[in-house]
Amino acid sequence: MGFGKRTEKGQVLVLLTVGIITLLGFTALAIDGGRLYSERRTIQGVTDTSSLTGGLYIAQHLKDGINASVMAAAEAAAYQRAENNGYDPTVTKVFITDDANYYYVRTTIHTSIPPTIVQLVYDGPLSVAATSEARVPKSTVFALGQALVSLGKGDCPHPGISFSGTADFAVHNTGIFSNSNCNPSIVFNGGPSGDIDGNISAVGTVNPPGGVVSDGVVNADPIDFQPPEQPNCDGLTSRTDSGNNLLPGIYANGISIGGNASVNLAPGLYCLDNDFRIQNGTTVGNGVTIYMRNGGVTVNGGNNTLTAPYENIWQDATPRYWNGMLFFFAYNNNSDLLLNGNGDSTYMGTIFNYNGECTLSGTGDAVAFNTQLVCDKIELSGTADLDITYNPEEQYLPPTNIDLME
């Protein structure tokens, strides 16, 4: 009985076909998958920059107020950025929303690319999409927008804010806040009478204000205060305080002005490694930020005009504007500040002393301070009436941080 020979030619053909299809599949995955991944990364970058562009437009108009026209312009700016990168409004969608604390700019791009190898088994377009959302905080104020803010890091029983002396006082356009949990957290000693336009808020208790008029006493929750970055003194020239015309720079020995001297401080950043002292005389410094890396501040008498910079007139080495910041104490500087003024002096801007005490005092006539005090502890004293006016446009405005949420 004979048997014919069995052939394997058909099986080889089947295996070869399967192998070619498999190879084509891997090739398509490598080529078209790589193209999809590359396009996905590209449009992710475009959505990021588009959302940030819209968010930046909102941030630049926070101070003036956000209305429907500003929102529309921010949306248009985001669309334009996407279009500049090759993605027109037919594939781009921008939505701007807000809640109690933030504005949100959300950009989505949904597009497609034509297939190359994969078209052998699929003839439709390859879709790819990406989404990004930028978040812009609504707050445009520093330290709760209060005229007096005690950070309250010191040990009890020392109160965060103390009113003493015999003179009356007034706080205009806002209130006062003590983050100290001491009892009392705010104390009124010596029976001063005063008028506070806003609330008296404290984490601890408030000594009965007696003759003080305010919007009320509020039991506040403690805040987790995030201090701003410190000024950057890199590149500044080393200087001394000799002469009547001082320039921005690094003053290793501090600055001391006394007698009947008449001294002018040019606009800019002054970085001091020792005390800043004024004893009588006439001192004028418009557009200055005095950064106390070490040492304290004592201004006792004299005819003084010290105002913070405004309108972006200069930047530090970061670069960063310091609009509204008059005195800034380094975080590791535990020294104190004393402004003992008179009716001939003007002080304007925020005073920030993270670890030290700030004292406003006066003798003789009424003394006006257009300042915001943000210090570990605060004391108002003296025999002259103290008038503290808080105007947001005159105080430090921290830079707006725009976060990418996704």
Image (spheres, grey):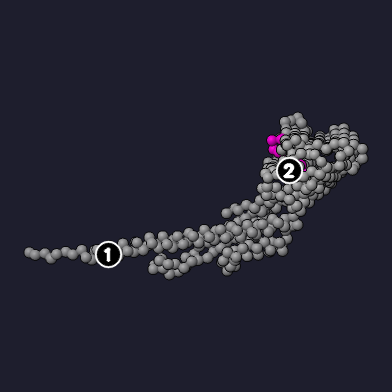
In the current view of this chain or complex, which residue is farthest to the top? Answer: 157
Amino acid type of the residue that numbered disc 1 sits on in the rendered structure: Val
Task: Give the mark, 1 or 2, whose residue is nearer the N terminus.
Answer: 1
Q: In this view, does 79 lie above or below 235?
A: below
Q: Residue at x 58, y 60 (%)?
A: 47
Instruction: From the viewer's side, name the closer residue of 179 and 259.
Output: 259
Q: Position of residue 27 (x, y in %)?
A: 38, 62
Residue 222 lies in the magenta-colored region:
no
> Given contact means CB atoms under 8 Å apart, are the residues at marks 1 and 2 in contact?
no
Q: Image check: 381 left or right of 94?
A: right
Few, some or many residues within 10 Å of mark 1 (<14, 14–19, 20+): few
Q: Residue at x 48, y 66 (%)?
A: 113
Q: Can residue 171 be seen in this view?
A: no
Q: Position of residue 352 (x, y in %)?
A: 75, 41
Extent of the magenta region: 326-333
Checking the image for residue 14, the label placed there is 1
Q: Where is residue 326 in the image (x, y as percent from the top left)?
A: 77, 44
Tag count: 2
Where on the picture, by quarter, is residue 24? Answer: bottom left
Amino acid type of the residue that numbered disc 2 sits on in the rendered structure: Gly
Checking the image for residue 116, the label placed there is none
Which residue corresponds to mark 2? 249
The quarter of the image holding the C terminus is bottom right
In the current view of this chain or complex, which residue is farthest to the left? Answer: 1
